[in-house]
Image (cartoon, grey):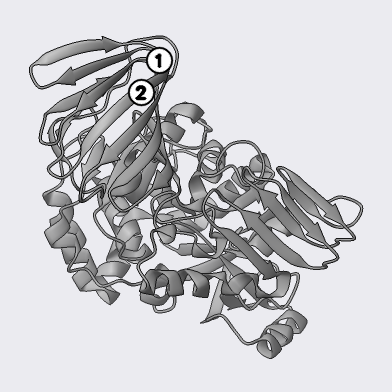
Amino acid sequence: MSRPDNSPLKITPVILCGGSGTRLWPLSRSLYPKQFYPLVGDGSLFQQTLSRANNPEIYGAPIVVANRHHQFLVEKDLQVVGLKGQLILEPCARNTTPAITLAALAAIQKDPDAVLLNMPSDHLIEPIDDFNAFVQKALPAALAGELVTFGVTPTRPETGYGYIQYDLDDIGVAKKVLRFVEKPAVEKAKEYLKTGDFLWNSGVFLFQAKAFLEAVQTYEPLIFEVCNNALVLAKDSQTWLVDKQSFESSPSVSIDYGIMERAKNVRVAPLTVHWNDLGSWQALWEVDNRDKDGNTIIGDVVTHNVSQSYIRSEGRLVTVVGLEGVIVVESQDAILVASQTASQDVKHIVDTLKLSERSHTKSHATEERPWGSFQSIDKGERFQVKRITVKPGQKLSLQMHHHRAEHWIVVSGTAKVTRGEEEFMVFENQSIYIPCGTKHRLENPGKIALELIEVQSGPYLGEDDIIRFGDDYGRA
């Protein structure tokens, strides 16, 4: 489709990548949420979302709105898919209305008539070609100034989704919305299923940036003002770090509650492709491959007399006997056991763990970094042992610790170590000691991964005991 001046119109994908996916704990955690995991299909869920919009005949460069802590995870997946886009980094979570407002403000700086396709980063939508064809069918409604939301025909009385009631007599692709309904009780959900004029709210939206911003100015003027100020203070580059002091003052409001339920120019287009928000372990069980007993088995798992279950091991042997309709998920430092019917309630476990300030809600035993990763192997009152992997050609920041000393033993590869004013090459089966309070840096100058064991000792071993003097990845 072309503009009035005959220049080609390309839709701008806006991918919202800030969710934490608490119902998919223990795999999904705040510093490594579900969208960066290969839970189903090829690649991470975020990679799959990027691939959906990787069609230069339809789409322009994407805008990705993400938590600042996930920057290198986003950049890594963009590189894997082969896409370059604008990255907007939020300093804190403020829900979908502020996130999409940031993207819309960024888009109109480049194109006042920009059309945005807003997608969560963690949904399953297939086939891709059918989805893209459907987006193009709904495009005329967006160009006419409508705010188009995509709905999904319900297949069961689901209580975990919002619903949209629409006009059955409307013959257009994007139909008149009668009302939005929050997540209903099961009896109401059964009633909606019978009437045939309700759709699940997919969280996918298509509209012109200027039409959306007009609605934000009308219904949530404070959000518009805050986001506008926060972006004015952002860095002028492909990666925008949103001003924290400005953005923290924004109300936390979803696009459904803040805009779609209140605006007069809202339409819903019933999706004609397969959709699943993959919001729970039960949802993954529904879409993943199952054996003759109805089980989804992933990893090192042995079962006997087990049926209709989702069982996943990330490393250790997991055995299950004599159960039906259960979820068992093993990670390096936590195990979840739940019934299928209670899969939505996993978030309550996460809430309980947060109240007791357990690290299990934030990070894994293995943590990803731009330069590689580290795994905590053992920890005591005044010591901690880690396994560190540094990718070829990468290096850690030049840093110093106030409260701990470190001893590095190279297992494989070669390490280039800066210690104070000196530099050393440390080879396999060799070690080096870094005294407390000494500036130091670790680098892998080789062609293979550098593996080493780090032994920390001192009165405080937290990750926040770090002063950076130089960093290749822009970390403070």
- Horizontal arrangement in the rendering, residue 161 relative to residue 355 (left or right): right
Q: Secondary structure at mark 2?
A: strand
Q: Is residue 439 above or below residue 323?
A: above
Q: Which residue is mark 2?
A: 409
In the rendered image, which quarter contains the C terminus?
A: top left
- Horizontal arrangement in the rendering, residue 156 relative to residue 152 (left or right): right
Residue placed most toward the observer, 166 or 180:
180
Q: Which residue is mark 1?
A: 429
Residue 410 falls in which quadrant of the image?
Answer: top left
Q: Is residue 48 above or below residue 308?
A: above
- The location of residue 177, given as percent across then percent down, is 54, 76
Residue 456 falls in which quadrant of the image?
Answer: top left
Rendered residue at 53%/33% (across/down): 55
Q: Earlier in the sequence, mark 1 or mark 2?
A: 2
- The location of residue 221, given as percent across then percent down, is 21, 72
Cα–Cα gap, marks 1 and 2: 7 Å
- Horizontal arrangement in the rendering, residue 421 relative to residue 237 (left or right): left
**Number of residues whose C-alpha sits closer than 10 Å to that of mark 1, classed few (under 14), some (14–19) or many (20 or more):** few
**Number of residues whose C-alpha sits closer than 10 Å to that of mark 2, classed few (under 14), some (14–19) or many (20 or more):** many
**Tags 1 and 2 in contact by the CB under 8 Å rule?**
yes
Residue type at the position of mark 1: Asn
Regarding residue 192, the answer to whether it shows in the image is yes
Rendered residue at 78%/58% (across/down): 320
Residue type at the position of mark 2: Ile
Q: Is residue 270 above or below residue 60?
A: below
- The location of residue 386, given as percent across then percent down, is 39, 37
Q: How many badges with numbers are in the image?
A: 2
